[in-house]
Each structure stands twice: as structure tokens, then as C-alpha cells.
Amino acid sequence: MRADPPIADLPILDLSGLAAAADAGDATALRPVADAFDVACRAHGFCYIANHGVAQDLIDGAFAMSAAFHARPLEEKQAIAINRAHRGYMAMASSVIVTSSIEKATRPNLSESLMLMHDVAPGDEAGPLDGPNQYPAHPAGFRAAVSAYDAALQSLARRMTRMIAVALELPPDGLDRYFARPTTFLRLLHYPPSPPGADARQYGSAPHTDYGFITILAQDRTGGLQVRSRDHHWIDAVPIDGTFVVNIGDMGSRWTNGVWRSTPHRVINRSGGDRYSMPYFYDPDTAETIACLPTCCSTENPPRFPPVRYGDYLMDRIDANYAYRAKADA
């Protein structure tokens, strides 16, 4: 890992060859893109990835299913309201981000979403959020299209984890054990346009950091995602055809002793139309303890964060930020 680079626009990384190099565990072949990822994570905690290997028809199909689901009647969506396993429909303005480190949220997020998580075999429910996904009956073909997309994103994330291990001066499989049972979230988000006359603090998604390891985001062409730079300016993560936006979450930052940034970001939809996005969160097993990696600390640079069990960290934030948790506990 090298010295911090200067602030610039969000970089675009070319992942051509990632699949073959990651599957073979070839550290030499992974090194160039791993080094580029290290630079991006030091500067921003964010980048774009191109030539990522996920077929465009899978992405388009998942977007189409998301838009069709959100167009269904509210009572139909509420029939699969989010459950205690954090799976299902979250209605408009039902989450308030209270764990932000940079701004106190004063209004609920102006968005609705459907949350799907990792599949859990019956009888294998070990984690705090293990449970059944809730798939809508309509539109037809929803489960097949969205599950195919989810599987493609998990394959990409597993390969990227091997690239990331090399960036952190570990063997390509150096992080694999933390993801033997990954915690995954696929969130199908719909942001309506900001209301006329809305003030500057009415967000589609208020400033926040992600909780886990990495996020892989597909966004439509509407725009609205902004990333906070180290000098406290907001950088537009404009939609770029053929790319995903990738960012480091809190656990990724803790692993690197804060060298890689878990960067605040927000969404403001001023387009006048609807915005759809599909963040995929790829995180460790909830039972795993995340502590500073030995390659990221030394006697002169001791760990800045205490070890934390990922499931505990995750539940603290979910319990704080989602209204349905408080209602269920009342």
C-alpha cells in the first residue's frame, strides 16, 4: 500500500481479466488492478468498475423488475412488509439515518425499497438476520430475474475480495474465510423526485456510511448520488454506462486501520423524475470478528479500532436506523 494520492474525480477501474486471475488465485495477475483499487480507496473510498463481467441483460432485467414492483399498489407491496429478518418491503419515508457521523438527520429518507438477503437453508438459521426472503407474486418472473442478478453480483464480489486481499498485501485467498457464509443485501430502491420547494436537507438518502465490507451499486441514468471528499465537498457520482459504483464500508475501513475510507455519501433526486438504484452489499459472516489486519498496523501505527463482531455492529445500526425495529420491540 502506497502514499495517499491527491483528490480528483472518482476513478474508473478496468476489471478485464479479474475472473480468470481471481479464480486461479494469481497474485501477479491481480496486482495491477489491486494497486489501482488501493489508490482509489485511499483517496475516496469510491470508484467505478468497468468490464466487470456481469451481463447487461441481467442488470436491465433486474431494473425492469424493480420498477414494475414499485409500480404495484401499495397494499400489495405491504403484504410483504419487512420482517424481523430484515427482508421485504420498506415503505416510503420509513427509515431515518441516525448513525451518520457528519449530519443529524431531521427527516425520513424519501425512498421505498425491497430488501433481499442471502439465502438460508431451513434449519441453518445461525445469524441474527437469517430467515426467509419475501418475493412478490407480481410482476411475473420477478424471483428468477432478480435471483440471477443477485448470483452474478455474489460471484463478482467474491472475485473482488481476492483482488482486495492482494491490495492489502495478503495472499489472494487471505480474506476468503470471512466470507464462507457471507452476509449479503440486495436493495431495490425507488426514489421519487424531491417535492417542489423541498429544502436542502430533504434527502432521498441522508449522508451516511455503509456498514460492511464493499458495496456494488447499479444506478439508472437519473443521477443524484454524491460522495463526500476529504475536503468536505460533494462529488457527483454521475451514471456511466457499463459501470458499477463500488465503495468501502465501515468493516473494510476497520480492517485497514482507517487507511481505506468508509466515505459518507447521499442521494438527492432533483431530476424531476423517478430514480432507481440497486446497491448490493457484500459483507462478512455475522459471526466473524473484524480486527485490523497485520499488514495494516505496526508498533509505530497501532490499531485505531477495537475488534468488533460484525453481527453486533450490524445490528446496532439496523436497530437504530429502521422504524420497523422500534415498533416490533415496543
Image: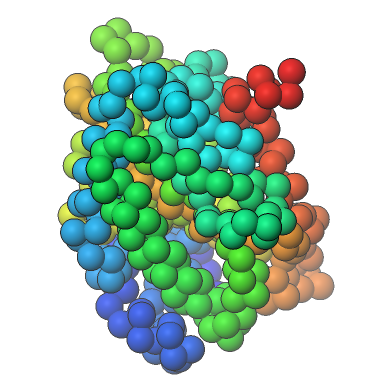
> In the picture shown, does residue 217 fall above or below 22?
above
Residue 291 can be seen, yes or no = yes
Quarter of the image with the C terminus is: top right
- Give the residue at x 68% y 24%: 328
Quarter of the image with the N terminus is: bottom right
**Horizontal and vertical percent position of residue 107:** 50, 16
- Give the residue at x 30% y 8%: 197
- Give the residue at x 61% y 29%: 321
**Horizontal and vertical percent position of residue 136:** 37, 38
Query: Where on the picture, by quarter, is residue 139?
Result: top left
**Horizontal and vertical percent position of residue 272:** 19, 22
Residue 207 can be seen, yes or no = no
**Horizontal and vertical percent position of residue 59:** 25, 55
Query: Is 142 left or right of 231, judged from the image as shown?
Result: left
> In the picture shown, does residue 316 fall above or below 194?
below
In this view, the residue in front, 65 or 282, is 65
In this view, the residue in front, 322 or 300, is 322
Query: Which residue, as the protein is rendered here, is positioned at the far top?
Result: 197
> In the picture shown, does residue 31 fall above or below 7?
below
